[in-house]
Image (tube, rainbow, N blue to C red):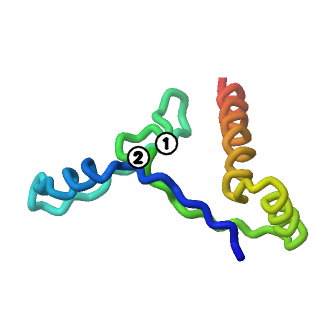
C-alpha cells in the first residue's frame, strides 16, 4: 500500500468560507488577453518568473521520464527515509536551478 500523507489546509475554515462568500466582479466585459511574458534574454529584462501574473501558490505539473533503475532507486529511498519522491527531487532540483541561474547571470556580464 502506498504511503499516503495528508497536508494541512492552506486556509482555516473561517478564511475559506469568507473567501467563498466574497462576490467576484469582473473588471470589464471586454475579452482580456493575457499579457505576453518577458523572455529575459536581454540584460536588465524582467525574468519570466518575475512577471506580475506569476503566482507562487500555483503549482504546474511536469512529467519526468526516468530510467527504470533510477525510479526504483528513488522508490527505495522513499521507503527507507519516509521522504516522498517529490520532496527528495525538489530538495535537489531547487538548488541546482538557482545555481544554474547564477551561472548564466555571471556569463551575461
Q: Position of residue 69 (x, y in %)?
A: 90, 69
Name the outermost residue toward the top. Answer: 109
Q: Residue at x 54, y 29 (%)?
A: 43
Q: Position of residue 92 (x, y in %)?
A: 75, 45
Numbered label attached to residue 55: 2
Q: Residue at x 55, y 63 (%)?
A: 61
Label 2 packing within 10 angstroms: few (<14), some (14-19), many (20+): few
Along the line of sight, which residue is nearer the eye, 22 or 99? 22
Residue 58 horizontal side relative to residue 41, left or right: left
Secondary structure under badge 2? loop
Q: Which residue is mark 1?
A: 49
Upstream in sequence: badge 1 or badge 2: 1
Q: Position of residue 23 (x, y in %)?
A: 11, 56
Instruction: Give the Cα distance between marks 1 and 2.
Output: 9 Å
Along the line of sight, which residue is nearer the eye, 55 or 44? 55
Mark 1–mark 2 CB contact (< 8 Å)? no
Q: Residue at x 48, y 52 (%)?
A: 8
Secondary structure under badge 1? helix
Label 1 packing within 10 angstroms: few (<14), some (14-19), many (20+): some
- Mark 1 or mark 2, whichever is nearer to me: 2
Amino acid at each position: 500500500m502506498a504511503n499516503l500523507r495528508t497536508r494541512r489546509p492552506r486556509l482555516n475554515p473561517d478564511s475559506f468560507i469568507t473567501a467563498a462568500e466574497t462576490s467576484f466582479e469582473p473588471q470589464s466585459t471586454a475579452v482580456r488577453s493575457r499579457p505576453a511574458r518577458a523572455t529575459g534574454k536581454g540584460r536588465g529584462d524582467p525574468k519570466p518568473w518575475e512577471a506580475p501574473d506569476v503566482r507562487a501558490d500555483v503549482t504546474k505539473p511536469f512529467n519526468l521520464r526516468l530510467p527504470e533503475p533510477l525510479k526504483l532507486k528513488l522508490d527505495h529511498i522513499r521507503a527507507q527515509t519516509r521522504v516522498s519522491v517529490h520532496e527528495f527531487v525538489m530538495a535537489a532540483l531547487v538548488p541546482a536551478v538557482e545555481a544554474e541561474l547564477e551561472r548564466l547571470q555571471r556569463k551575461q556580464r
